[in-house]
Image (cartoon, grey):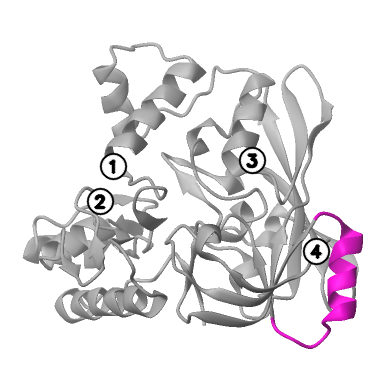
Amino acid sequence: MFIKKNFSLKKFNTFGINVYARYFVEVKSIEDIQKIFDIYPYISKFFLGNGSNILFIKDYYPGIVIKMGMKGKKVIKENDDEAIVQAYAGENWDEFVNWTIKKGFSGLENLSFIPGTVGAAPIQNIGAYGTEVKDTLIKVQAYEIDNRKIREFTRKECQLTYRYSCFKHPYYRNKFLILSVFFILRKKYKQLNTSYVEIQKELENINVKTPTINDLIQAIFNIRQKKLPNPKKIGNAGSFFTNPIIGVLDFKKLKYQYPDITGYSISNQKIKLSANSLIENIGWKGKKIGNVGIYEKKPIILVNYGKASGMEIYSFSEKIMKNIKKKFGILLSREVNVIP
């Protein structure tokens, strides 16, 4: 374990913002974590995965940035139908998903190609193409910072809902460090989730009527290539905003006023609005201010066109949120984790 001073985090956040940390360290064991808290008991700490869902709004972090480097994945137990697997927090998420598929397990395939780490997945309850982490998660193993103990959270205790978990609640935030995650996966591919409209269209495009798991993964890869910018080429953190959830009657009223607004039912009473369609409706699709802009193929994504600061990106997002609030009366929320 080597602690670095005045360390640039430009390569450790996908927006490519050149923010500096007073201290930086990568931890690879519980012992490393405990040493850090012994050495720096009082200064602020930020736990970093792959930096794919964060926005630093200042150019200097005065505490210590702790990169989670604990890795490992294994099958805990299995039978003819199911397998329970454990993955440590520092594992690359997409590599872990690919590992489960090669093992002959299914349940995470719709979450292929999502950047980030296993440890970050339950915090955000990441989801894509009709699947969320909560669908297969069994429990989370976390380090309780104040008590220096390992604690387990069941799926129910994690309170997983749309892009939310208990770890995002102010009471839990910065009090727990996720160490590993347990999933229960199927051992047969008969239940592939191809219900998502974009997947169905892409399967048609590649002339597949009875998809295998590899066909499904190829379709997802094609969709993401067409619509999502590569952060290695243009700075971004994927979807910057979450899709607002409103009542059915409110949606009908909104749709009557603005026919181009889209959404889909998530229950008998609730509709998930498309944040993309809201941003398009206020005329901001492809808009650019200085070095910050909206990705033209997917308005929910904000991009750093060059040397934008975190505050520039944050201010840009504020303008979008105010415009949408003014026109539709809807509060748009950030999916990206803002680091003050």
Instruction: Tell me, yes or no, whether the two marked residues, 2 and 1, touch with CB atoms within 8 Å.
Output: yes
Q: Is residue 58 left or right of residue 282?
A: right
Indicate which disc residue 227 carries. Answer: 1
Residue that appears at 89% across and 69% down: 34
Where is mark 4, residue-wise?
2
Q: Is residue 249 above or below residue 118?
A: below
Please rate how many residues cluster around mark 1, counting C-alpha atoms within 10 Å: few if below 14, some from 14 to 19, many from 20: few
Instruction: Tell me, yes or no, whether the two marked residues, 1 and 4, touch with CB atoms within 8 Å.
Output: no
Q: Secondary structure at mark 3?
A: loop
Q: Earlier in the sequence, mark 1 or mark 4?
A: 4
Where is mark 2, residue-wise?
298
Residue that appears at 29% across and 49% down: 264
Q: Earlier in the sequence, mark 3 or mark 2?
A: 3
Q: Is residue 91 above or below residue 217?
A: below
Q: Is residue 197 above or below residue 24?
A: above
Instruction: Tell me, yes or no, whether the two marked residues, 3 and 1, touch with CB atoms within 8 Å.
Output: no
Q: Secondary structure at mark 2?
A: loop
Q: Is-magenta flag for residue 32?
A: yes
Front: mark 3 or 4: 4
* Residue 87 x/y as whole percent: 74, 42
Front: mark 3 or 1: 1
Q: Is residue 280 left or right of residue 114?
A: left
Please rate how many residues cluster around mark 2, counting C-alpha atoms within 10 Å: few if below 14, some from 14 to 19, many from 20: many
Q: Secondary structure at mark 1?
A: helix
Indicate which disc residue 136 carries. Answer: 3
Q: Earlier in the sequence, mark 4 or mark 2?
A: 4
Q: Which residues are drawn in magenta? A: 28-44
Front: mark 3 or 2: 2
